[in-house]
Image (tube, rainbow, N blue to C red):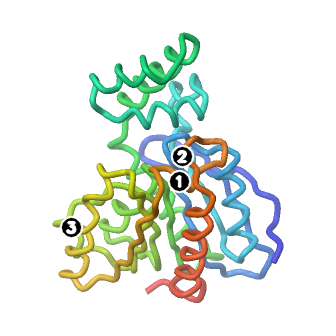
Amino acid sequence: MQANNGDWVSIPTAHGTIRGYRVKPSGPPPWPALLIIHAVMGVDAYIENLTAQFAAEGYLALTPDIYTNDPGYKQHEPLHIEMAAHLGTDRAKQKEQLDQDFDDVLRPKISAARDWINNRPTTSYIDLISATFDYLHARDDVRAIGTMGFCMGGRLVGELAVTGADLAAGVIYYGGPPKLEEIPNVRCPLEGHYASHDPGITKRIPALAEAMKAAGKDFTYYIYEASHGFSLSPHTPSHDEAATKLSMGRVRAFLEKHLRHATFR
């Protein structure tokens, strides 16, 4: 199934209008919609291509640009942001890694990107994602919504799910879990994909699985012999082709089962 060319749409939110990259499938509506949430690097060519791929498979695919109204984002290269994100949050270790891993040209660029990451208005991001969900939910040509996110986008998938949003399915790629006490609000099956070399996040997932089970919720997760960000652009250092292929096959089967034929409850 071929998708139509993508376009940028305006999405109203409480924090101002943001843009979203949308690609429609070629089949007749109403469609199942897939809300794709980008990683820390923003909407890059890889995410745009992934959006188009899922539209070609029959989903109305939409990726909101969380950084639309963030002037600081535009001052950094996505690859520098990705490298900075892998420095972690410990200031002393950040400096040690900067001195050890980067030359005099790259070091100030990575450091500046890390400063931007540290100061982003992250508490507003769930509002932007909830507004994007509402935008899709209000459309006459959408009959169900699923969501998939990477890194911080994966975390936001969980945060959206625990708001009680009427989702048909949620896919989390190496995102931190939501507040466990809010798990009973989840209304859809979740599937998680995590990296073995990402202990800060992956070690927290068994507790999420236990909370989901205790609340009677459907949660399946997989751990890959890879690093955080393994399914992002092949141009990033953490990309792992084998883990990406295996995980995406599982994602497609999960969405086929839970989203493709779903309707709003």
Q: How far is disc 1 from disc 3 in space, using C-alphas?
A: 23 Å
Q: Residue 207 carries which label?
A: 3
User: Disc 1 or 2, which lies upstream in sequence?
Assistant: 1
In depth, the one of 207 and 198 nearer the eye is 198
State the image coordinates of residue 169 (x, y, percent, origin top left). 46, 76
Residue visible at 18% across and 81% down?
A: 214
In depth, the one of 106 and 58 nearer the eye is 106
Q: In which quarter of the image is the C terminus?
A: bottom left
User: Disc 1 or 3, which lies upstream in sequence?
Assistant: 3
User: Disc 3 or 2, which lies upstream in sequence?
Assistant: 3
| Picture quadrant of residue 114 | top left
Please give the residue where the numbered disc 1 appears in the rendered image: 230
- Callout 3: helix, strand or loop? helix
Cβ–Cβ below 8 Å for labels 1 and 2? yes
Callout 2, which amino acid?
A: Ser
| Picture quadrant of residue 35 | bottom right
